[in-house]
Amino acid sequence: YSGYLGLSLNNLVFNDAALAPAAVYNAVVAVLIFTVGIVIAGKSFSVKNILKVPVIYALFIGLMLNFSGIKPVMFSGGYIVNTVPYLMLIYVGYNLRNIKKKEIDIISEGVLARIFGGLAAGTLFILVFKPGILASRVIMFSSALPTALSTIVISKRYNLDTGLSGGMITVSTVCFMVVMPFIVKFIYYIV
């Protein structure tokens, strides 16, 4: 799941035309994370838990504002939108102190699964469903992006290991920056 990073990197790698498919990808994955992800984290299905998630309502409100053509005042300067990722990164950094030595192997395996498993899943998806060229590239690239910041929010909410989540976010982000040129080259080779 790419979140804010996915929109920016898709724009950087594939230009402005990639923003629309990247936003759609981001919205679909956000809904999956905050529905299916909550069921997995909460270890049981509860409509009540899903209805407590503000992301679902925020996405719906954003779509309604988009279709109506109204631009919310709070977005005009971008202060709120631009501040949220930084505040979440502070929280991630703070939780890194909770990583236990035995979790380093789990983090390493998770990072490999996240980046290369995501790339494989994205590649399989485009080979089966054959979307357009730009959409295919965005899907493959976004599927390989590092662990999203929202995972630490879910970890905290359901009393899961925030150190492990923070470690996954941090290590996958660093590793992705190293392998990103190779991933982009692979994407252009496939599509």
Image: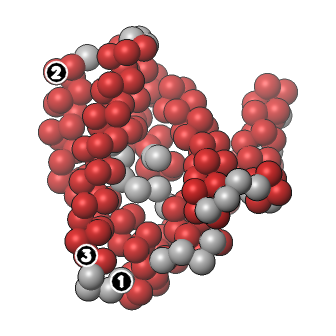
**Image coordinates for residue 147, horizontal then vertical, percent:** 41, 56
Q: Is residue 12 visible?
A: no
Q: Which of pointers 1 and 3 lies earlier in the amino acid sequence?
A: 1
How would you rate the neighbour count of disc 3 (Cα within 10 Å): few for under 14, some for 14-19, many for 20 or more?
Answer: some
- Label ID, residue 104: 3
Mark nearest the camera among 3 and 2 is 3
Colour mapping used in the image:
secondary structure
Give the Cα distance between marks 2 and 1: 38 Å
Examine the rendered structure and indicate whether residue 189 appears above or below residue 35: above
Amino acid type assigned to the residue bearing label 2 in the image: Tyr
Amino acid type assigned to the residue bearing label 1 in the image: Ile
Circle 1 is placed at which residue position? 99
Amino acid type assigned to the residue bearing label 3 in the image: Ile
Q: Quadrant of the C terminus?
A: top left
Contact flag, marks 1 and 3 (Cβ < 8 Å): yes
Circle 2 is placed at which residue position? 189
**Image coordinates for residue 68, horizontal then vertical, percent:** 84, 27
